[in-house]
Image (spheres, grey):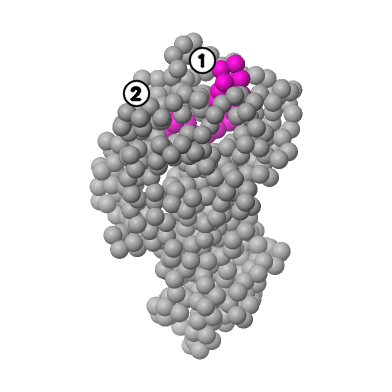
Amino acid sequence: MLRTGSVSAAVAIVVGFCLTYSVATQSAFAGLGGLGAQRAVGGVMIDPDGSVRAASKAEQQEMASLIRDAVGRADGQLAVATPRRFVSLKSLQKAIAEAEQTGGTIDADLGFLAGLQRIEFLIVDAENQDILIAGPAEPWKLNADGTVVGKQNGQSVLRLEDLMTAFASVETARDAGGIRCSIEPTAEGRQRLQKYLAGVRLRSGQNPKFLEAGMREAFGPQQILLDGLPTDSRMARTLVAADFEMKRIAMALVDSPVAGLPSYLEMARNTRQSIAQNPRWWMACDYEPIARDNDGLVWKLTGQGVKTLTEQDIVKRDGSVAGSGQTDRIAQRWATTMTEQYESLSRTKPVFRDLRNAMDMVVIATLIRQQNLDTQAGLDLSVLRGESASVPTDAYPMPRTLQPQCSFIRGNAGWTVTASGGVNIDPFSVVQAPVQSSDLRLLVVDRPASDRWWWDSNER
């Protein structure tokens, strides 16, 4: 996977990051819900010069006001939470195509996939030449920071544009060996920082915080690497933002929003740290084996969806890094704790639920392709796969570099530095070995008489 390397020295730091990206352009679909021009992602403000910082309360209110009309309100049956809502991919494509052909926009109902919050089931409906996805759904609301979440549980809703990215990225991800995001210092930056720190001599009891400006300048801009998906997609921004937030929490650059998830710095305080090795963390898929019925018509996706993994990086003299294949005890404890607290974390930081939703959609899109379920259903998915030139989506210019921030920790062997993290989505390993379940019978799907693209399981 793409790695974020680390640097150590006798005096060391923990390096965090600020994102740099610009405002998205608008397509004919007005942001698949009118949200393409958002300057904020999960409470992080994108300034006109491309720098990123925490948004003030006033700025959050202003952003929410700007997009409130586009978000709209869930009315009628959409205003009712349900444990299982069905979405017809066939009718969904028709609704998208009709909106484009008439010069209309994608409304909030479509943009937020009828309030779906998870994909639990995939059903092949060959009789109607259709594939259905189903899961829990809630009416949505707009948070103060511009995130869109369920009214009851505060968890992010699925996005149509992410679903389209998932379908369009299956073959790209296959060629790339998965979908990956990594924020990496350059080798030159690591070398400059090593040289800078080599000349530092701290007096007993001296606070090294005064070194921050020099360390930032020496370390220099970080690079963002994305692979396996369109780098100008909303999903790509989600991966970068989730990685960014994970590192800020791990490195105590922000207070952890979850009481049960202390920072790595708190856990590692007064422990021995290696000069040549540093931990890195990345978020990866965490699913149970996909279950299918005897006929391969009903498929079930279970599991938390996301887990945090860790490995020790070895930093070489030339500034390059290599994985050691080993883990640090404290870093592993932090990774395990973040995995255990992931659901709680995603309630306070919706970007983490956005990441889980993205993984769900990538896995389902890959499952359909790998098992040829569209062929089995007799369904042409060219609209969702982006093979129809008449279906434009928004482009989000992605960040290329980041400027470091610094925070400090002292271990009993000195000061330590780490700048590691990423996201690795490998849907192919999730779908490669489905298990047959005799308990998984064809769900009763009460399709409405009309060709409406969504309905609830209790509707007749």
Residues under numbered marks 1 and 2 in contact, where contact means CB atoms less than 8 Å apart: no
Give how far across and how far down residue 393 sits, in percent.
40, 42
Q: In this view, does 180 lie above or below 379?
A: below
| Most foreground residue, 67 or 278 | 67
- Which circle's residue, 1 or 2, is located before the other in the chain? 2
From the viewer's perspective, is the residue at label 1 or at label 2 nearer? 1
Q: Does the rendering let one see residue 2?
A: yes
Q: Which residue lies furthest to the front in this view?
A: 389
Image point 51% across, 15% down: which residue?
A: 447
Query: Mark 1: few, some, or many residues within 10 Å (few <14, many ≥20)?
Result: some
**Residue 102 on the magenta span:** no
What residue would you read off at disc 1?
Answer: 447
| Residue 76, picture quadrant | top left
Image point 43% across, 66% down: which residue?
A: 402
Give how far across and how far down residue 122 sits, in percent.
59, 28
The part of the chain drawn in magenta is 112-132
Image point 35% across, 30% down: which residue?
A: 101
SS of the residue under disc 2: loop
What residue would you read off at disc 2?
Answer: 75
